[in-house]
Amino acid sequence: ENCSLVEVWLICNTFIDACTHAICNKGGEVIKLIGDCVTAYFPPEAADAAVLACQEVVTFCAQLREAFEEVLDCRSVVACGVGLDYGQVVMAQCGSEGMTEYVVAGEVSARVMEVEALTRDVARAIVVTEPVADRLSPAMRDNGIIPCPQGVDGVPCYGILGEEWE
């Protein structure tokens, strides 16, 4: 609330660029941007890639905060929480030659925001629903997931061990 418009623009663009880079490098697609929220799609068999992209973004935010903690700079406040869900999604593309928009409909697009909100409760930067956890490779699961005390819409959720949510 205390940032200038230029600072807000810098925060959002820095974060969105980092998210887009991580998501695309891991085989996902950025499908929607709303303010500082980035929504992405990964194919059903790419649960590990989705988690790796999230870990890259969380690490980027931590490194950015560390790099700017001594300086009064808006980038020192960049942090994120990530929710991952699995389910049926309907994606439609509309627009003109110069501008394209994706519209995402389905249960997942609404539920993922509620999953992200759990990051604060469980003090983990990344929270996944049980369907995502079930699709992780054994190696990824062995790196550590912890059950959340609550789920979303009756679906159990898990925090990914690693960076704590700040």
Image: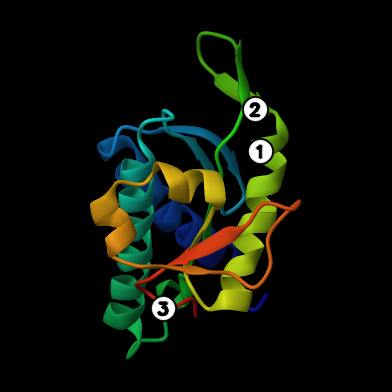
Secondary structure of the residue carrying tag 1 is helix
- The residue tagged 1 is 109
| 7 in relation to 39, above or below | below
Label 2 and label 1: CA atoms lie apart by 7 Å
Three-letter amino acid code at the position of disc 1:
Ser
| 87 in relation to 61, above or below | above
Q: Is residue 6 something one can see in this rendering?
A: no
Q: Residue at x 48, y 45 (%)?
A: 132
Q: Position of residue 111 (x, y in %)?
A: 69, 46
Q: Residue at x 65, y 64 (%)?
A: 117
Three-letter amino acid code at the position of disc 2:
Val
Image quadrant holding the N terminus, namely: bottom right
| 47 in relation to 8, above or below | above
Q: Residue at x 41, y 28 (%)?
A: 43
Q: Earlier in the sequence, mark 1 or mark 3?
A: 3
Q: Position of residue 4 (x, y in %)?
A: 59, 70
Residue 161 picture quarter: bottom left
Residue 33 picture quarter: top right
Q: Are marks 2 and 1 in contact (CB under 8 Å)?
A: yes
Nearer to us of marks 3 and 2 is 2
Secondary structure of the residue carrying tag 2 is strand
- The residue tagged 3 is 76
Secondary structure of the residue carrying tag 3 is helix
Label 1 and label 3: CA atoms lie apart by 29 Å
- The residue tagged 2 is 104
Three-letter amino acid code at the position of disc 3:
Ser
